[in-house]
Amino acid sequence: MAEEMLDALDRAGVRLTGPRRKLAALIERREGHFTAADLLKDAGRRRMGIGRATVFRLLELLSEQGLVERIDLPDGTHAYIPCEPTHHHHLVCLNCGATTDVDDCGIEAVTREAARRSGFKIEQHRLELFGRCPDCRSAN
Amino acid sequence: MAEEMLDALDRAGVRLTGPRRKLAALIERREGHFTAADLLKDAGRRRMGIGRATVFRLLELLSEQGLVERIDLPDGTHAYIPCEPTHHHHLVCLNCGATTDVDDCGIEAVTREAARRSGFKIEQHRLELFGRCPDCRSAN
DNA sequence: AGCACATATGATACCGAGTATCAATAATGC
DNA sequence: GCATTATTGATACTCGGTATCATATGTGCT
């Protein structure tokens, strides 16, 4: 997955620098969603001497490439999650933070109906689902 | 609508203070979504001497009562919109910021399908629709 | 391999949204 | 009307993210 990110960065025409490689590896090791601060802490623990700004810059690049997405948790905080660069939605475990992507299973119809009722022309949508992942469901 | 807010605050058992009344009126006058800073500026322009903290405190109260909701715009900023206290979703005009509420027109089925595919137990969902409102569509 | 150049870096300072604190003030119940 | 208690505004703070800028480092070229 770190490969995937580096490939995407390469394709995007930016440089494959040391900090970027290291951060990609750190993101790979993460499970579930994470914050910029999490990454920074990871980097700090390993004495990687990576600057705050660099972390945000990489997250921005990755998010432009669709490999990472910023989501807003129900508690108001926000986090980043690694994901596929195609259009999709997220399912987030409220317990452990694990995420999976789900693709449009019928939202088209919903947006069409909403457009009809409101007179709006709908151009974008965002659907976020929150719940318990299979592991957390069976864990207690 | 300001009435509605004041009623709700009353029902919630908090005091109907001057600043709260004034802010409710300011919210009523707003069209589309607004930020805490917008309200603060409105209040400042009218020399109402309302503190920053008070604005945030009221927005929090109203949001607890479901009369206001904080949404994240596609451009990453976030804003508040007045709305009905029932479960619903938002349709936001990308041009003028106007919003309307739409109720679940078939999302249940979508979440059920996503749950089936993923094994998650879905407990909450959030759907946001962005587009052009009827006015902005005809305006150009 | 070496070099020039543009791009990326980390430090620092900054910004904007939101929260904590706290003494002063005002809404409510009696 | 008055005591009580919630609320207020000022101030300082936190936290996520961005701007700046001199220094360092990938990259394309030879």
Image (tube, coloured by chain):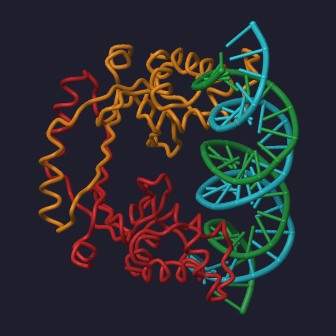
Chain colours: A orange, B red, C cyan, D green
Q: Residue at x 45, y 58 (%)?
A: B70
- Residue B76 location, x and y as percent? 48, 52
Q: x and y percent of residue A19 in the render?
A: 66, 23
Query: Image quadrant of residue B123?
Result: top left
- Can residue A17 be seen here? The reply is no
Nearest to the observer: residue A30 or residue B109? A30
Front in this rendered view, residue B51 or B73: B73
On the image, the x and y values in percent for residue B101 come to 27, 63
Screen quadrant of the C terminus of chain A: top left
The residue at 18%/44% (across/down) is: A107
Q: Residue at x 50, y 27 (%)?
A: A9
Give the vertical position of A57 relative to B132 (above or below). above
From the viewer's perspective, tell me whether residue A4 is left or right of residue A102: right
Left or right, B113 with reference to A67? left
As drawn, A117 above or below A54: below
> Where is residue B59 shown, x and y percent of the image?
52, 65
The answer to whether B68 appears left or right of B38 in the picture is left
Res. B61 in view = yes
Residue at point 55%, 75% (across, down): B39
Does residue A34 sit above or below A4 in this rendering? below
